[in-house]
Amino acid sequence: MDARLLDILVCPLCKGPLEYDKKAQELTCRPDRLAYPIRDGIPIMWADQARKIEPV
């Protein structure tokens, strides 16, 4: 994932920052507890495609 792209991408719901999980190939939003998949190097930023994650 390109670092410049990570700098400009935000959560589509809350507009907050996203964290990149290289192993899972996901971008996570902690406040909304959603993980957006990255498929073929392209982040899928639709809430209905996101996976719900448990609070840490």
Image (cartoon, helix red, strand yellow):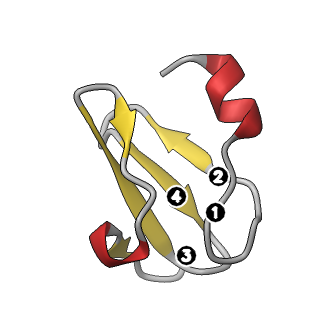
User: Does label 4 or label 3 sit earlier along the sequence?
Assistant: 4
Q: Position of residue 15 (x, y in %)?
A: 75, 66
Which residue is under mark 2?
A: 18
Residue at far left of view:
40
Task: Report the disc number at residue 56.
Answer: 3
Q: Earlier in the sequence, mark 1 or mark 4?
A: 1
The quadrant in which residue 5 appears is top right
In the rendered structure, are the residues bearing label 4 and label 3 in contact, judged by CB atoms less than 8 Å apart?
Answer: no
What residue do we see at 23% from left, 27% from top? 40
Residue 37: image x %, image y %?
Answer: 32, 51
Identify which residue, 19 or 12, lies in the foreground: 12
Q: At 45% across and 57% down in the image, what residue appears?
A: 45
Q: In this view, does 29 lie above or below 27?
A: below
From the top left corner, tell me how far across and down residue 12 is, in percent. 61, 66
> Tag 2: residue type?
Leu
Instruction: Please state which of the two labelled residues, at mark 4 or mark 3, is closer to the viewer.
Output: 4
Along the polypeptide, which appears first: circle 2 or circle 4? Answer: 2
Whether residues under marks 1 and 2 lie with C-beta atoms below 8 angstroms apart, the answer is: yes
- CA gap, disc 3 and disc 2: 15 Å
